[in-house]
Image: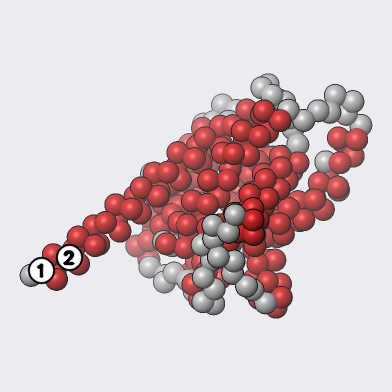
Amino acid sequence: MGKGGSLSESVVKKVLLSYAYVAIWIFLSFTVIVYNKYILDRKMYNWSFPIFLMMIHMAFCSSLAYLLINVYKLVEPVSMSREVYLKSVVPINFLYSLSLWFSNSAYIYLSVSFIQMLKALMHVVVYSIGVLFKKDGFKSEMMLNMVSISIGVTIAAYGEAKFDTFGVVLQLLAMSFEAIQLVLIQILLNTKGICLNPITSLYHVTPCCFMFLCVLWVIVEYPLLRDTSSFHLDFSIFGTNSLCTFPLNLVVFLLVGKTSALTMNVAGGC
């Protein structure tokens, strides 16, 4: 009886802790979404360079993770072979950079409320990718629920007053790349036996993502920035924005490691 009681208490603690992580993730995610929308929206701060904004985030997170691991030694470093890094981390970061680019570009064209509504489709995309990668088992009841969600979102999107086709395409592309990325992160963390905590995950992920974003920035945004005479970097705005993204990225990697990508997105969409 005593063992059963302690086991039940342990399970309850784990469940409560998972709900706490999800609650923190939802709060931080909403904060970053609204802040990014403020920066990127042409009617607000009017900084329409999402790739450059993401580069600032990645540089900040990478620098902070480096300091925590190599300078302050608060976390033990995790060694990783070049083969594993090239075959696992690099593809994930390529998808991550594309997801960041498309999702933040969508804020220029769509309202936050409409984007959040579209994100209800994320459950469908993540589940489908999970089945494709054999991470989740196919269940007809689950797929029926997913189809119902898709139909509901389609009907709601039809009545959107500020519907922008290009913005919707950007958001759908972002969700597709993010879904593949989340499933691959889970495979990297669990299937291959690589134990990365949230900080070491950032340490290995963000520098590579920064490099991919740099390539995109040179091709897409640099020519526009070069011709912009009013270019300036407001450290108070971009600094506080980056401070919000660091804990968000930590919680994202924590949740993907502790739960499934599908569970994470369903919880976030509720």
Give the residue displayed 58% in from the left and 59% down from the top: 73
Q: How is the image coloured?
A: secondary structure
If the image is split into quadrants, where does the N terminus sit? bottom left
**Residue where numbered disc 2 is placed:** 6
Q: Are marks 1 and 2 in contact (CB under 8 Å)?
A: yes
> At label 1, which amino acid type do we have?
Gly
Answer with left or right where residue 18 lies relative to residue 115.
left
Q: Dot 1, crowdedness within 10 Å: few (<14), some or many (≥20)? A: few
Going by the picture, which residue comes out furthest to the left? Answer: 1
Task: Tell me where residue 3 appears, x and y as whole percent.
Answer: 14, 71
Q: Secondary structure at mark 1?
A: helix
Where is residue 8, by image quadrant?
bottom left
Viewer-nearest residue: 85 or 96: 85
Q: Quadrant of residue 168?
A: top right
Q: Circle 1 sits on which residue? A: 2
| Mark 2 Cα shell of 10 Å, populated few (<14), some (14-19), many (≥20) | few
